[in-house]
Amino acid sequence: MSRWHKLSCKAPEIHIDGELPRCRGCESAPDLEYLISKRSKSSAPWEASPDKPIGKLNLHWPSCVRYRRLQDSLVAGKAELDEGELSYGEAESTSTPVSTALTPTVTSYIYDKSLRRDELRLLCVDSAPINREKSPVHVNLEIYSDDHCPEYEALSYAWGEEDGNKAQIQPLYVGPYWDIMLQTKNCWHALRYLRPCRGVRMVWIDAICINQENMVEREEQVAKMGKIYSRCLRAVVWLGDDIVKSNQPGRDCSPYPTRCFFDDLVPTKPNGSIGLTQMLKLQYFQRIWIIQELILPPELIIPVQGKEFLVNQSRLNRINHPWEMTDTPWFKYICTGSSLMRQNLYEIMHDTWRSCATDPRDKIFGTLGLTFGDSFALQIKPDYSISNTHVYIGAVAHVLLNLKKSQYLLGSFPRHESWTFPSWLSNWDNRKDLDYAWKMRSLYERFPQHGFWPLDPVPDRWHKLFNRSQKGSHIIKILNRNAGNWKRSLYRTNLGARWYHDASVDPSTATLSINLIHLVNWESRDRPQPSPLGIAP
C-alpha cells in the first residue's frame, strides 16, 4: 500500500527527517524496505498475454484488417496434400473478435480518478530545498482537459539506465499525504534534475501520468501520446545521470546549467567529453518510444555534462551528419512535427525496426503516433490485452492487405525449424532474420526491375504442391530438390485480378490468402552466386 500514515490521520503534517518524510500528526514514517521488497515480487503491468497455438489464434486486431476463416481446415486437406494438391474454401469467419478487456476502474490513493478520453494528467514538480541532493522528491498530480491545460514540458527518457537496470526501487512522494510511488533510478534522477529552484514545474511523464495498472486508461493515453508530445512546450531529453553530470569539478554546484545550441555539440570530443557520435550510441536512442518523443515536440532540451543543448529544426540543419548511415536514420526529422508523419506504417517500421522496447508490442504501438500519412493506421488503436505475436501478425497483415506492400513478402520465409508460424511472417524475435528481411525489401525497392536470388537455401517446407481448383483460383508448382539441385516452375495467370483482391488472413491459423498474378520462371543446377547487390545474374 502506498499510504504509510495511520488510518486515523486526517490532516497530515509532513516534515523531513534526514532523507525520509515523517508525519507529525500520526507520528508515522514509511517503511521503504518493505515496499521495495513487495514491489520486486509483483509482475510488470505490461506483461503480455501468452501466445495461443496455431489453430486457436483468434486474430481480430486491428479492425481494419480483413480476417476470414478458410472453410476447409489444414487437417481436412491433408489427404489432398499428400496427393500433391491442397484446396481452400472461402467462407466468412464465424468467430467473434475479442474486444479489449475492459479493466474495472482502478483507483488508489495516488490515482483517485480514472482519466476520460479527452483528459490528461500533469505532474506538478515542487521546487527543491537548499539541500537538494539529499531531499526527497515530491510531486502533485492534476487532471486537465486536453484542450484546456497549462503549458507543460514532456520528459523523454528510458525506463532503465544504460546498464539496463529497470528495478523500481526509488521512492517518489505524491500528494498531500506523500503517498509513495516507486520508480526506476533513471526516472527518479530525471525528476530530481527537473525540480525548479522556485515555484513548480509542469511536466508530463508517461510512467507517472498514466495509471499503468489501468489497462483501459493505458490504451487510451498511449493512443494519443503523439498529440501529447506535439502540444508540449518542449521535451526534455534525459540520457542518464552519468551523462548529465558535469565532467568538470565544481560545475555541478550551480543549480543553473550552461546553455548552448545543439550545433555546438561537435561529432566527436576527446578527453572523456561526449560528442554527437558518442551520444547517438547510447541505449536511450535504441528505444522505440523516443522516436515520436523527439520528432513531434517543437523544441528539445538535452542536458549533457553540465550543459543544456537547445535543439530545434533550424539548429539541426546546421549539422552535416550522415544520418542514413547510422542506426538512427529518423534523427534528421527531430522537431519537425510532421515530416516523418507523412509516411505509412510500412515505412515507419522500415525506419524504426532496429529500435527496442520493454514491452515488445510497443515496437508497433510506439509508432502509431507517427503514421498520419496512413489513413488506415489512424483506425488502429493499441490493445494491451492481446499477445506479442497477435500484434505482429496484425501489423504485417495491415501492411500487406491495406497498404498493398507486396515487397514485405521478400525475405519473410522461416529460417529456423523452431519457427512454427506461416512463412509470410518474419521471425521478429530474431535480429538476424529481420536484418535479412529488410535487406531484401530494400533491394527490391531500389531495383524493382530485377529478380532476386535468396541468400539462403529454400526451406524444405516450401517444396510442396499447392493447387487451388475453384473458380478464379491460381496454381503454383514447386518441384522438390533432386540430388542437391532444385528447380522452380511458376506460372503466370491472366485473369485480370490483382494479387490483393479479396485477400484475407485466417483468424485461427494466420494463413494468408492472396491471388497469384505473376511469378518469374527460373531454374538452377547449383546455387548461383549473387552479385554485390544481391541481384540475380
Image (spheres, grey):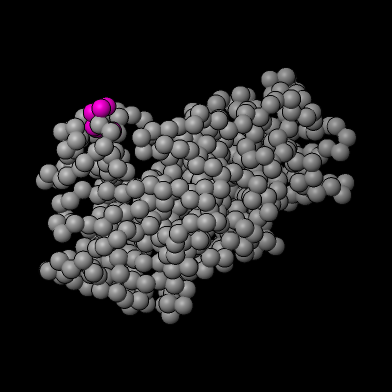
In the image, the segment drawn in magenta is 3-8
At 34% from the left edge and 59% from the top edge, which residue is drawn?
Answer: 201
* Residue 360 seen in this snapshot: yes
Q: Is residue 315 left or right of residue 58?
A: left
At 18% from the left edge and 68% from the top edge, which residue is drawn?
Answer: 254
Examine the rendered structure and indicate whether residue 269 appears above or below residue 369: below
Residue 130 occupies quadrant: bottom left
Examine the rendered structure and indicate whether residue 405 appears above or below residue 102: below
Residue toward you, 453 or 94: 94
| Overall secondary structure of the magenta section | loop
Q: Is residue 371 left or right of residue 246?
A: right
Q: How many marks?
A: 0
Residue toward you, 328 or 415: 328
Residue 229: x and y, percent? 48, 58
At 53% from the left edge and 32% from the top edge, which residue is drawn?
Answer: 385
Residue 341: x and y, percent? 58, 61
Residue 404: x and y, percent? 71, 51
Residue 5 in magenta stretch:
yes
Q: Is residue 146 left or right of residue 67?
A: left
At 50% from the left edge and 28% from the top edge, which residue is drawn?
Answer: 104
Q: Is residue 466 left or right of residue 195?
A: right
* Residue 491 seen in this snapshot: no
Image quarter hosting the N terminus: top left
Residue 471: x and y, percent? 88, 35
Residue toward you, 313 or 152: 152
Image quarter hosting the C terminus: bottom right
Residue 480 in magenta stretch:
no
